Amino acid sequence: MAELVPLPLPLLLRRAFLEYRREGKIFDLPKSKFFRGIPGIDFSVDFHGHRAATPLGPAAGPHGQLAQNIVLSWLGGSRIIELKTVQILDDLKIPRPCIDIANVGYNVEWSQELKLEQSLREYVGAAMLIEILKASKLLGEDFSPGETVFDMSVGYNLEGIRSPRVRSWIESMKDASAVIAALRMGLNGYRDLPFPARISDTISLSTFHGCPAREIEGIVSFLLTELGCNVCIKMNPTLLGAGEVEHLLHDVMGYREIELSPEAFAKDLQFDEALDLVPRLQRVAQVHGKHLAVKFGNTLVVKNHKSFFTDEQMYMSGPPLHVIAMNLVKKFREHIETSIPISFSAGLDANNISTAVAMNMVPVTTCTDLLRPGGYGRLIRYLENLGAKMREVGASTISDYVKRYAGQEAALVAETTANPRYRWERNKGMPRKIGSKLWLYDCINCDKCVPVCPNDANFVYEAPAAAMAYDNFELLAEGVRRVPGGVFQLAKAHQLANYADACNDCGNCDVFCPEDGGPYVEKPRFFGSLETYRKYAGANGFYIDFTPPVTIYGTVAGESYVLALDPPANRARFETEAAVIEIRLSDNQALSWEAKAGAAPPGVVDMLPYLKLKVLVESVGDPRRVHFANVVGLEEVIRESAL
Ligand code: SF4
Ligand code: SF4
């Protein structure tokens, strides 16, 4: 299984600049999906005393983990970015696949898969990338994104959060000067940009399921008083009570196959405990000049009734969670005696953001919906729809808009609960599968696998569509002898590949690919270094070393090869596990060979792997398309980028 290997900041920058200039995209998000504001509408909001240009953002999850994900969220219009949850146990092995968004939305992934230090660099790097994009005017003189707030998410218990490593991690997010200084060293043009050192001073707290009230209180007090952070307590949907959740899920919405976990309801924070806890913690926050908020909410633990994951339990999100969380917000507000800011995350999408914002919830964050076809490109519709609704009711600011709906919360929630779009009948469908099997090349080219990947790990490359007849060569003591070969068929010019260092095998692209096998498994998997290629290539992996002579390392069907190209000399050096063969590039004629020490006599060399590697190195290396697998080899120096 591949491990996530974050890309260095200069490479991310180089890709962003080159890709935008050549293809009008950044990390595969087309510029038509960048949020550029809506004339006459001010979406800005206050969050924990900070101004943010929109109330929208990714929920702590896959869209807030790697630097490119955070930038993609931001390009789509997110201005309150909840970063993926970090915790002391930063070498967890998350079962794979871990995301099943086929219809309802389930997962078994939770905190970051990176080491704490890596997460810190990703979050700081993302903040720097955003500053550079703003300063560069790459996106146009009129691009005015406004303020962005980064919100940390930490978990899961007091002992872990108080540990020196997590504590120092939080301190480093509050003052990232040292990390910024180190990252600056890799930059040229923007090395001296005044990057803000305070990346974040707000924390959304994720507690483990079953976390006792006193432990939650201890953690929040610690974060408010000793670490001087503003805190948002993420509440579990179990707070609504088993009876009410079951009624909504089964009777109202018809998700009868979903089985609740009674232990989760018994052990999680109880409603009355929350009503006591929140005002007490608000007083602590006030005394220390900090802000406290609550978030509805977390995913819902349910029993695993499917075969996608192997765990006994899984976490439900998506449309049914939306209805449960909206009802919980209503109940909480009806009973809590103080006024407390509420943030929201549960099945948010472009069609319900207007209601969530009308209920005065900030931020409103999304995850499941962004894992569906279109990915980050779906975000812009959220804000367009919200803007349209604001216009409809004559509001030009969010606070005006909220005022228009004052006193209507119960009606809004009732409308949501009755809305058939959240019901099982409307959400039981599965993505279409057409019964064909993916392989290394060619597919139906729907391109769904590119935007559904939160890490932008899948990419398109152009190859020569052709049927190439080839000969094999018998390697003899006196030279080589041509023997019958076959035909290497590439039906389409438009091909898909995977950048394995950015792929965590979550499985989401498999769910939405109409063909079987999973793009991240079957398509050529490119690694960013020889080291990761050697470690994780398995039966299908490639690495291109762009230092001349350009060399591709490839494992095809479990056999490893190396191909070095020397076009000026019209020669290639092809290394199989048994021999090294010199080949004339223009007609793929083997010229000479040498046996490898200790290897069995090679007999006939199969030229099909040679052709596969040759096509891959030439087409993936083609600089007309910019992606993670070739960006290191693109030599253009862009004056104003920090390369
Ligand atoms: S690999 Fe699957 S999802 Fe990706 S373009 Fe091909 S058919 Fe579509
Ligand atoms: S390429 Fe597919 S499996 Fe890999 S991270 Fe992206 S969506 Fe997940």
Image (cartoon, helix red, strand yellow):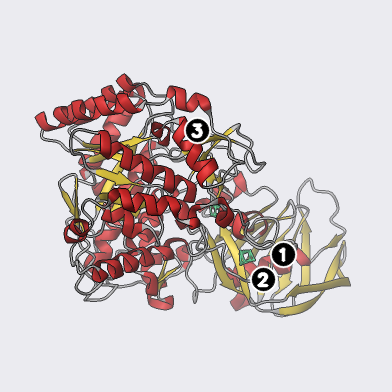
The answer to whether 377 appears left or right of 57 in the picture is right
Residue type at tag 3: Leu
User: Would you place residue 370 above or below residue 99 in this image?
Assistant: below
Q: Is mark 3 on a helix, strand or loop?
A: loop
Q: Mark 3 highlights which residue? A: 92
Sequence-first disc among 1 and 3: 3
Sequence-first disc among 2 and 1: 1
Q: Along the line of sight, which residue is nearer the eye, 383 or 240?
A: 240
Q: Is mark 1 on a helix, strand or loop?
A: loop
Query: What is the CA distance from the residue labelled 2 to the residue labelled 1?
Result: 10 Å
Is residue 58 visible in the rendered image? The answer is no
Q: Which residue is drawn at 71% across and 62% down?
A: 438
Residue type at tag 2: Ile
Q: Mark 1 highlights which residue? A: 434
Q: How many marks?
A: 3
Q: Mark 2 highlights which residue? A: 444
Query: The C terminus is located in which quarter?
Result: bottom left
Query: The N terminus is located in which quarter?
Result: top right
The answer to whether 101 appears left or right of 208 in the picture is right
